[in-house]
Amino acid sequence: MLACIRCGLCLTSCPTYVLTLHESEGPRGRVGMARAVAEGHLQVTPDLLEHELNCLVCDACSAVCPAGVHMDPLQVVLRSAIEPEIHRSWGERLLRRLVFSWLFMDMARFRVLARLLWLYQRSGVRSEAERLLPEVPRRFFIPRGESYPSSVRRRSATAAVPAGDGAVPAGDGAVPAGDSAGLVPEGDAGSQVSIFAGCVMSTALADIDRATLRVLLRAGFTVRNPAEQGCCGALHAHGGDLRGALALARSCISAFEGSEGPIVVNSAGCGAMLKDYAHHFRSEPSWAERARAFAARVRDLSEVLSPGALPVVHGVDGRVVYQDACHLLHAQRISRQPRELLSCVPGVELVEIDEAALCCGSAGIYNLTNPVQSRQLQQRKLDHVLAAEPSLIVTANPGCLLQLRAGLVERRSPVQVKHLAEILDEASAP
Ligand code: SF4
Ligand code: SF4
């Protein structure tokens, strides 16, 4: 907060400022209000709460700030501090407790709920609105501590596969002998990575996790899938429950300590949170070093795949819009790598859109907590995307994927939205 020099360079990057042109709906206003509260000059009023909680925590302001103001950790601490001041109904408090303190704290419970949703979706009694939820797949991606040998090394017959380790199940991407042999450079072959499965990604979007695994194996990595990993805690951190977020962070750090090499994430929001662990534990002596070591290993999928490392054997014909997820573009400063990977797929014509850096309005559960602003941003994004006349939208974050899909279904558009891992999986499938 003290770093802010009130220059205003962040204003036009901020989605809520762009929508309203109000100082209190921009980063400079939010930093100023937070500082005034911290210094005792301002009461926490309903008005102040509204302006602070309208922030998408998209980090677009952090990416352009010349003074190094970082909005994400500021909002995390602020929201946790003002949570007791927020008037919530009895039902809302109960729901928050159920979701934050019970459901997300245990992946076994989370999977039971996802299974119930799967049953419900197949019951035939779904409404039109619920059809906008992701189609929950039959099989989840459950981390059990297994190790998958790289497809490249398997062909070389030098890979030692520890007894009992799970090979990728048949039909799940195991590369048959003779497939695309010789197309894979040995650059990263044999390196070990660990996959961060996620909570929503490993259940409602488990097919994307499996696609990620296949892509990593075909690129020559040996992949560990550590047991006991769970939710990264991003929803808790941005929802005012810092204690819950840190509890989840501790179990994630512990779960990955038995593995080596990069921790690969296919969800931009989770990746940004995992990289922030070092900051969140900086003043906790018993965890600071462990959190720093963990955060230093976290990589987005597009950071570990070098273009050309994947045996691309199929093309994708069409105009493709790559939708920058805020937590990849702004929070992790990753924009070149996904585009380079897409450019390696024959037939892909990448097209850029106006306001590409402006949030699509998904932002975790923002579309539930702030439906009005979320919808305004969704429609604005869709207008820009469709003006480019793409046949496909590719993104690397579950929130953007579902937000754009929902909007396109509503507009009865035939344009598809896919995760980057799905495109790379299709392009490299034997
Ligand atoms: S760009 Fe940074 S320093 Fe300038 S007003 Fe915004 S937050 Fe403050
Ligand atoms: S994080 Fe995003 S919404 Fe929040 S103040 Fe910064 S730019 Fe605006």
Image: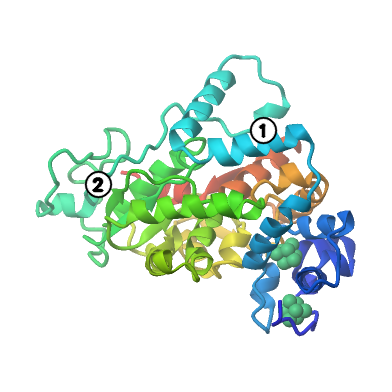
Q: Amino acid at mark 1?
A: Leu
Question: Which disc number belongs to residue 132?
Answer: 1
Q: Is residue 177 above or below residue 67?
A: above
Q: Secondary structure at mark 2?
A: strand
In the displayed structure image, the side of residue 371 where residue 223 appears, left or right: left
Residue nearer the viewer, 137 or 42:
42
Q: Let me know if residue 311 appears in the view.
A: no
Q: Secondary structure at mark 1?
A: helix
Tell me which numbered mark, 2 or 1, is placed earlier along the sequence: 1
Q: CA distance from mark 2 to mark 1?
A: 34 Å
Q: Is residue 225 above or below residue 203?
A: below
Q: Residue at x 34, y 57 (%)?
A: 310
Residue nearer the viewer, 279 or 224:
279
In the displayed structure image, the side of residue 80 where residue 47 appears, left or right: right
Q: Let me know if residue 78 appears in the view.
A: yes
Q: Residue at x 72, y 28 (%)?
A: 129
Residue position for label 2: 148
User: Label 1: few (<14), some or many (≥20) within 10 Å?
Assistant: some
